Amino acid sequence: MRRRDRLERPDGDPAPRSLAEFLARAGVRDRYRHYDLGAAEARLLRATPHPSVPHRARRRASHGWSDPVRDRPLDAERARRDLKAICLASVCEPDAAAHLDSFTGVRTDLSGAVVFGCLLHLAGMREGARFWWQFAAASGSAKAAAAAYCLFLDHSRRGEHHDARHWARELGRRGYRPGGRRDLREVRLCAQAAVLRYVDQCEDPDLGPVPLPRAGLSLALGAFLPPPPVTVVAPTAAGRPGTGPLRHPALTAAARGTVVQGGSGEALVEARRALAVVRVLEQHPLGVRAAQLARESGLAEAQLRPLLAMLCEEEYAYRLGVGAYARGPALDRLAGPGGHGLAGQLQRTLALARDSAGAAVYLSRYAGGEVHITQMAAGPATPPVREWVDFRDAAHASAVGKCLLTQLDHDRRADHVARHRPARLTPQTITDSRALFTALDAVAPGAPVFDLLEYSPGVVCSAVPLAMGGAAGSLALSLPATHAHRLRSATETLRRKAVPVLLALLLTGAVPPDPAPAPAVEPGRAPDRPETPTPARPQPMRAPVTPETLRHLRQLFRTPLAEAAAAPQGPHLVSDTTAGAAYLFDAAPDGDAPRLSLPHTFTSVTPGSLTRPTGLVVLGT
Amino acid sequence: MSQWDPTARLSYWAFHANRRPAYMRFAYLQLGSDAAAEEAVDATFDSIMGDWLRMLHMDRLDAYAWTVLKHCLVDRQHRRHPWQQEPEPMDISAFEAALKEAHADQYEVLTDTIRFYSAVSRLVERQRDAVLLRYGLQCTPGEAASVMGVDEATVRSHLGQAHRRLARLLDTTADPPEAAGSAGPSEPAPS
């Protein structure tokens, strides 16, 4: 030891040197006083910025906990995340409270010291946490191996790799392997405050800050337990297709590898049934009795009754008398020129949804990589959300945004999050993109997505998915936080209201009426259906002409053809701005002007790519 | 980098110009050769360049950059061949310190600096870094704090703890007053 050296040198310097003299001599030469900064910059520019050393380390240890033996030196970012995860795990252990209580009493309970350190770390008292981990880990007891792991991570987090190596060796000697669930969750501010209330801060000149626990600290543990309904729990009755256990993300990826499917499950099935009823109603302009309606639409009485109530409310049907129905004015409205008919009808539907749910409702879709609120209905009693942050930048926080993101595949989600960095809008906002994706993956297809004070401190929201012709869409509502108890029932109402919205889209052809393409038009197969009287020309772009398309065309042409009638004499294409299709019209065989009775074919076009002020596009050949 | 907006590019080069000298000097003390130091610091800034746009959103950008530097340094140290005789970091510092001034008795100075730095090597790493920056590189506590990316008060408390431990290790008067943190290191000790 130095001390002995010194004592053994009686002839040495009689006056021991003071520390200040040592310090004064400690300065080193400045080797780089005239350093060529320009050359260094040129070198950096020449080098292609390869994935950095920390990145390499991160990739190697991307699954589960980082291993103190293998992952050395450990990347600081990863160490930070792991440390937070192990602190959460330690604090949430079932016997954490017991350990902590015994530690508060005698302060020699090593397991309690570890829990206390983790609690301090989570509460932001990093130095104090380190003290108690060192206290526990230095004992060498097997019970405190977790403390050594915490210290390994804490040193790595700060780039103190030599000190980290010390603990890594210690852990390697003991054969310690971190295990258990690795949960990355945000810690709420109130939880941190709860800890600080039970901690006394002492200051030791040598050891630095030493926090001491106060009795009752274990009460603060509860604040760190995982909140049961974070964002994505669907409060619907069990057994519904919307709810379910957590899905494996790969399943979601597989299911959503392609563009969104035709619709949102249950609601779309219901909307198709409603469509069948509307179709029957149209065949009977003078009205039809409910029994006949059920027979012709192939629905049971019990299924028909709620549908008819909905159709009457939305004015697709009109009740002539007891048990007799006729087509309603909404069908004429829908056939209005261009998109106006659809938009008008949707606005009506939204207003009805607002009144029955008692909340402001929003219709949105995901287009061009952005969240668009296309229509909304609010009122004095149902105030809309104040858009304090652009909705397009808040997809990670708002119910609308999250609902749209659930309908995207992983790449498009990642792309969206890369373009719109998740910002912390409220303490509840999920800002970690991995945590966000995990939350999104946990949403079963078709289930509602919730925003519990994540976008705005005073507002709760929910959204149900609504696939609109291949694009992601959603129907959402917002409630003031003081009405949060109504959120569950309002969301149920909202789910029902997805049906008329989908019906309007189905009627205008914005959503393909049948998810599977009809087999009749495949060129290789013999036409076995009577509905294709003319021999089908082999056209690769050819899509099925469903009765639905025909009907829509007929309605479409009733009004706007008058103004366009002058132009087309030969074959021509017709499209309207809301539909995703253009229809080819040929001259009828009897030599008249082209009529819509015989649309030979139609091709797929991108919705909105053909636009005209009138809404109707007529392209001559 | 060509796709960065001008502010990001400007901030990166400003950061580089600001930190490069301190990083180089610190790296030299750890690695003991100009080439190795330059290589390590280049790797550091290369890695920082790859991360810069993300780093601009961080609370403590300089703390993160510091961890990247330390990572690169420890990487270089690991990469050495075991049979390659490399001086220990603290010996490098001791020699560098002893060579600084032309003193009548070079050996006496060298003995002192070796004693001092071997005591420093027994400090906790964050105290060691603070001492190296403060007394080795002769930064002010504020400069040391910004290089390490911590508060100045934190550096002062590291230094205070280091003083007490060093005094004990060197068996000397434990009286570098707290003022030693703020006074210039070359000032004569008030004794």
Image (cartoon, coloured by chain):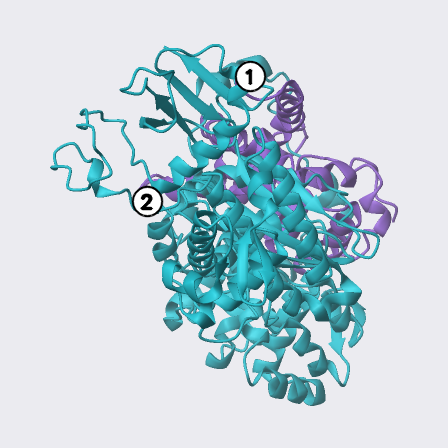
Chain colours: A cyan, B purple
Compared with residue A24, is residue A183 higher up or lower down, i.e. above or below?
Answer: below
Is there CB contact under 8 Å for labels 2 and 1?
no
Distance between the Cα atoms at labels 2 and 1? 89 Å
Q: Which mark is residue A563?
A: 1
Q: Amino acid at mark 1?
A: Glu
Compared with residue A10, is residue A220 higher up or lower down, i.e. above or below?
Answer: below
Residue at image coords 61%, 81%: A112
Which percent across, then down, holds residue A436? 54, 53
Which percent across, then down, holds residue A92? 57, 76
Compared with residue A501, is residue A227 higher up or lower down, i.e. above or below?
Answer: below
Query: Which class describes the residues within 10 Å of circle 2: few (<14), some (14-19), or many (20+)?
Result: few
Chain under numbered label 1: A
- Pick the front one: A353 or A308: A308
> Can see residue A586?
yes
> Can see residue A433?
no
Label 2 SS: loop
Q: Tell whether A479 sits left or right of A300.
A: right
Q: Which residue is mark 2?
A: B82
Which percent across, then down, holds residue A512? 40, 42
Q: Tell whether A148 sits left or right of B5.
A: left
Label 1 SS: helix
Quarter containing the C terminus of chain A? top left
Residue at image coords 70%, 51%: A351
Q: Amino acid at mark 2?
A: Pro
Q: Which mark is residue B53?
A: none
Residue at image coords 68%, 30%: B103
Which percent across, then down, holds residue A60? 36, 49
Residue at image coords 51%, 51%: A286
